[in-house]
Structures are given as structure tokens and as C-alpha cells.
Amino acid sequence: MDRQHIRNFSIIAHIDHGKSTLADRLLQLTNTVEERNMHEQVLDDMDLERERGVTIKASAVRMNYTASDGETYEINLIDTPGHVDFTYEVSRALQSCEGAVLVVDASQGIEAQTLANVYLALEQDLEIIPVINKIDLPAASPDAIAEEIRDLLGVPEEDILRISAKSGLGVQDVLEAVIRRVPPPKGDHEAPLRALVFDSHYDSYKGVVAYVRVFDGVLDPKAQFKLMSTEARFEPVEIGVFTPAMRPIEGLEAGEVGYVATGFKTVRECRVGDTLTTYHNGAETPLPGYAPAKPMVFAGFYPTDNDDYGELRDALEKLQLNDASLIYEPETSQALNFGFRVGFLGLFHMEIIQERLEREYELDILATAPSVEYQVILRSGDMIEIDSPAFLPDESTIEEIREPWMKIQVYTPQDYIGALMDLVMKKRGEYVTMEYLDKSRVVLHYKIPLSEMIVDFYDKLKSTTKGYASLDYQFDEYRAGDLVKLDIMVNGEPVDALAIIVHREGSYYKGQRLVSKLKELIPRQQFSVPIQAAIGKKIISRADVKALRKDVLAKCYGGDVTRKRKLLEKQKKGKRRMKMVGAVEVPQEAFMALLSLDEE
């Protein structure tokens, strides 16, 4: 098709502002999906996506639409994931577009994720079409929201569309605005091929299917291709477009969006953000912006039944086929036996993976408390990276430990500023600045260690502000801190899965809280069980789980006191022997106790 009749756009929004519903209405309006096949959230094909109302996996769809000027246009909607953990995927999807429809809820207004995605879109120099959704809700205040958007983007209020995606009101205006305002794609038809891989999934028959936007040249099914960063070569199994089902076609030209089935067996060979070109006479420079996805949060995944270890490994392998950002390696723990150390983009990513393992593969999993990747500078001058406290070298060999810090933005009604500042300060946060968005809403900018964020920060943020605050974050830098390893010993044996790296300032408090919690959780034995928190060789807290006492004197009535002493001594010897050979089972709840150490 003539490039002047092609439009590539994306929909960006905060979670639950109606992005997927608007996509459904657009598919209906353009007759891309037949009425009998229509259901809610067509592009979200995972049960988890529908339940949580969040797009986890990006998708793309081609629509044909006859506009009011009588011309037929090819419109490519590139859907983006809807959570801050997947910001890199969002940025690649936006790079594939020339325009973005910004959806804002008429009752909630601009929130953290909205603003973060607007900045991503502005960086890519996209044409932004602001849309106020859910105008038919009783709590809607479209006029106030229109003012917010006008102040943010500097667009006149008459250019801001007002719609209700659920009822379909005003949705046709969105399509007309896309055709009128979004520029057609640029690109040189004759130049060597350059196509951006903005997403991929694994198909058991066709291998890895790469979602591509062609910037220059032509994707010819007879050519041999290569990926510029991984140097992987392949001949295409199939080239096609999404409607939203996969439909094979003869080839893709500059400006078009579609897919290439590569035949690769793992997503690692075909990474998001890579540039696809021809193997012979290909492009010399890749498209800008490629970066390998870097896990930020790590946790141990262990099967509750050791016999399920093989099944857990197979399940992680299958999940990794569709998710290149998921990394894992085998690890063993004295307390939990065999399992895996798994890396995630963020805490939400970890939740999703855990839930998918339990649901889709029917596995019963114990996840240890999440930790982050630390940089350890040794006295020898070497630097090592560790993602588990168990790997921390001896204290005498360490020069300094660096931890990742994040830049965070909290959007909140001004009534909660004091409570939020208090919360962030308790988490070792550093104040940067505060801006007023309007008369009642502010944005607070802070820097905060990632290790303080990943545990319960988001839950506390929501409960402190009665659910009104929203959060966005980006990686800032690695920074040295006075960090120590807090070991937990049960019956004199260190439990490696309970070890945590904490700031020295809060170590005594956290050690004492953890020991007290474990005292309640560890079942009583026939002998007394000491639980100790230690930093290096120094014990900083201790509690004893009292022994279950058997009344050995019950049968001893009357007679001399020496008889009673003899029985008690015999019992004492037995308990001493039992303590030497007895093993103390640490229950699953003990590992979850690490997640709530700051609760009063």
C-alpha cells in the first residue's frame, strides 16, 4: 500500500484507564474482528491479563478503515504493556509508531504511568492525541481533566477528544483523529532492510515469531536475514500480519508492521529492540535504542515437594521461551534443598511469573523474599555482582558494597504529603523536589534504595493515601552504603534462605523483629531451640522456643527426693542427645516473615 495511506499508532494509559476497551471498540468499528468472535479485551489473551486488567504481553493488529474523505487507510495499532516493569518494551513499541493516543480516565485524571509514557512518547517525537475516557461515569469531571491535559501538553481544549470506550461514544472520532493528525511513516523503499523487533513470542511450529516494524527496505520471504546485535542468521518460515490472528502475506515494505517467523528455538536469539536486516548487502548501522533487558529483582523459587524439581525446571524453560527478560539458574539451600535463583524486571513481573507457574503448570512453589543485585568491591580491587545474600564474601575481604538506587515519582492529593514524606524517609529515601500539578495534586520526586522498595513499599504507599497515590520509578545509579549481612541461626545452624543484606543502621531493629517473628512461627520441639540473629560473629538478638515438657515425675509418688532427681537427670541427658541429633523444620511462613519486618 502507498505509504501516505498507512498510519502506525499506539495507545498509552495508566493501568485501568480503558486502553484495552478502546482497542476492542476500534477492532469492532473497523470490522477487523467479526461480531461472533468478539469478547472483552480481545488483544489480552492471557487469563491473568483479563483478571488484573493489565496488559502483560504487547500485541499488534492491522485494521483497514475508510475515512470520511472516502480513502481507505491501513492502520496499525501497536498495543503496549501497561506496567512500569515493562517500560523498555513500551519504549520499543513507541519507537515503531508515528503517533500515540493518550487515554486519561475522566474521574482519576493524569497518573504516574500516564505521565511516564507521555515522556517516552515525546522522546520518540510522536504526535500525541489526548483522549478523555469514561465520560459517562457519575464521578467523571472531563472539564477539570481537560485543563490538566492542556497544561501538560499545551494543546487547545477543542483538540482533546471525549469518549466512552465502553459504550462506543466518540470512538469514531479517535480513528478520524489518527488519520488526520498522525503523520504517514517515512522510510526509503530502495535502502538496505532495517526492521525493528518490538516484541516476540514462541510458537511450537514456527519457532520464535518476531513482531517487526519495517523502517527501510523490503522484507522479502526469499531473502536470508540476520539480527544485528546477536548476529543470528535465519531464513523466514513465514511473513505476515496480525488481524489479530496471524495471516501470512507475500512481504512487508517500509512503513508496514507485521511478523516474521524465524524458526529460532529460543527468544534469546531474537531480542526486543534488535534490528533485523538482510544477511547479504544488509544495513551497516542498527536502529538506535537497543539495550538487553536487565533483571532488577531476584528471588529463590523452590518446589515445596522436592520431587517436583524437574517439573519446575521444565516450566521455567517454557516461560523463558516467551519472555527473554526472565533468567534463572539452579541453586541449593540447606533449608529448602534444590531450587532456582530467578531474575525479574520488577516485583509485578515476579508476581506474574509465580502465578503462572502455579496456575498453568500446577506447581506448589515456595518463593524466598526478593532481593536486588549488589556490586561488591573487594580489597583486591576486583568487583563482583551478587544477587543473593548467601553469595556475599567474607566481611574482611570487602572494601565496600554498592546497592541500586531508584528515582521515584509519587503522584498524590496534597492531603497526604506529610504521611508520604514520613513513609519515604523511613525507607532511607532522599528528597529531591516537589511540584504542584494543580490546586489539589502534587508530584513528589525522591531517590530511594531499590531494596527498600521491593518488599512492601507499594502496599504502604496505597494504604497511606487510601489508594489515591500512584508511583513511577526508574533506575538511577549504584551507590555505596554501610551494608551488612544479617544471618539467622536456628538451633546453632545458619539458615541461608533467611539471610538478608540490610543497612547497619536498621540491622538491630530488623534482627530483633525477625527473631521475635520466628519464635512465634517455629513449632516447639522436645528440646529448647535458640533462634539468633548475627552480623558476622556478633550475635545481636536471641529468642528461645521453649521445649515441650513431659512430666516425668507424674509416676513418682512418695519416696525419697533422690528418686525424683535421678529421673530429671535422665531426662536432661536425653534432651541433650536429642538436641545434638534433632533437626528443626523451618515452616514456609518463616520466609514470608521477611516481607513484613517494618510493620508495627
Image (cartoon, rainbow, N blue to C red):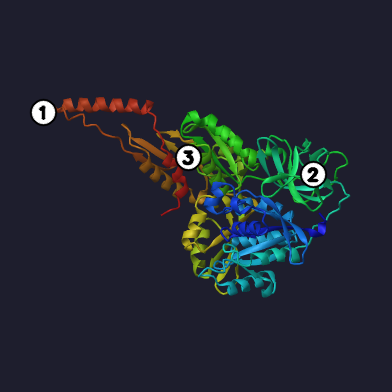
Q: Earlier in the sequence, mark 2 or mark 3?
A: 2
Q: Nearer the viewer, mark 2 or mark 1?
A: 2
Q: Are marks 2 and 3 in contact (CB under 8 Å)?
A: no
**Label 3–label 1 contact, CB within 8 A:** no
Rendered location of residue 162, percent (x, y): 62, 69
**If the image is split into quadrants, where does the N terminus sit?**
bottom right
On residue 250, the disc is 2
Q: Which is more foreground, mark 2 or mark 3?
A: 2
Q: Residues within 10 Å of mark 3 (few under 14, many from 20)?
A: many
Q: Position of residue 204 (x, y in %)?
A: 65, 35
Write the residue at 79% across / 53% down.
Answer: 255
Q: Amino acid at mark 1?
A: Gly
Q: CA distance from mark 2 to mark 1?
A: 101 Å
Dots 2, 1 in contact, CB < 8 A = no
Q: Secondary structure at mark 1?
A: loop
Classify residue 11 as left or right of residue 361.
Answer: right
**Label 3 sits on what residue type?**
Leu
Q: Position of residue 40 (x, y in %)?
A: 57, 54
Secondary element under disc 2, as helix, strand or loop, is: loop
Residue holding disc 1: 558
**Dividing the image into 4 quarters, which one contains the C terminus?**
bottom left
Q: Secondary structure at mark 3?
A: helix
Can residue 485 be spotted in the picture? no
Tell me what residue is drawn at x 65 percent, y 63 percent. 102
Numbered label attached to residue 498: 3
**What numbered label is drawn on residue 72?**
none
Q: CA distance from mark 2 to mark 3?
A: 57 Å
Camera-nearest residue between 515 and 534 = 515
Which image quadrant is residue 182 in? bottom right
Question: Which is more N-terminal, label 1 or label 3?
Answer: 3
Q: Is residue 202 above or below residue 93?
A: above
